[in-house]
Image (cartoon, rainbow, N blue to C red):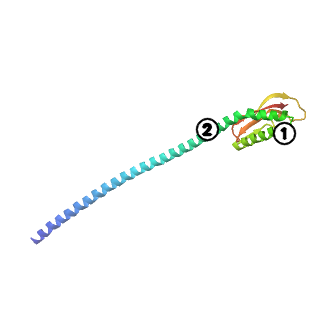
Amino acid sequence: MEETKKTAPQAESTEKAAKAEKSEKTKKTKTAKETEQLRKQLDETKDQLLRTLAEYDNYRKRTQKEKDGMYADGILQGVKTFLPAIDNLERALAAAEDSTLKEGVAMILTQMKEALKTLGVTEFGEVGEPFDPNAHAAVFHIDDENLPENSIAEVLQKGYIYKDGPIVRHATVKVAN
């Protein structure tokens, strides 16, 4: 009888241990599933954040490029309005006979050209340069033995360019054949 009494409590304790083990396995399985779901959510959130960062970076670059473009457009429009005044100052300098008047016009013209340089605008179109149809507008073709072929013989109106980029105004020239 003692043996049967011992086996029954042992069976109960074995049964309890089995239930505890099964419960433990169930808990571990649930925890593993929850952990996997959390990892999946974390990966999705991380991916979403990386995409948002990339979008923001692209937005920042695009708006900076637009802002730079608007600045350049503003400078080009402003310079275009001053070019006729510079042309007139150059004509006045060429026609002036009075030395004090000529000196004053030369000083104003120098200031205007320095202001253009500060903005990044440079002039081009000099006698003897090779003719470039992208930068020069040829209004005459002349025969001149002293100049090389397709070179500028005379500059009628200087050209201006903004920072090695867009041409503000093409140079109007005579070309030697």
Disc 2: which residue: 70
Q: Which quadrant is home to the C terminus?
A: top right
Q: For this view, does 113 lie left or right of residue 68? A: right
Q: Residue 121 is drawn in which quadrant? A: top right
Q: Which quadrant is home to the N terminus?
A: bottom left
Disc 1: which residue: 100
Crowding around mark 2 (Cα neighbors within 10 Å: few <14, some 14 to 19, many 20+) is few
122 or 65: nearer the viewer: 122
> As shown in the figure, which amino acid type bears the numbered disc 1?
Thr
- Give the x, y percent position of residue 152: 83, 34
Q: For this view, does 62 lie left or right of residue 25? A: right
Which label is found at residue 133? none
In the figure, 17 relative to 126: above or below? below
**Which residue occupies 49% across, 47% down?**
53
- Give the x, y percent position of residue 125: 79, 36
Q: Residue 85 is drawn in which quadrant? A: top right
Label 1 – label 2 distance at C-alpha? 41 Å
> As shown in the figure, which amino acid type bears the numbered disc 2?
Met
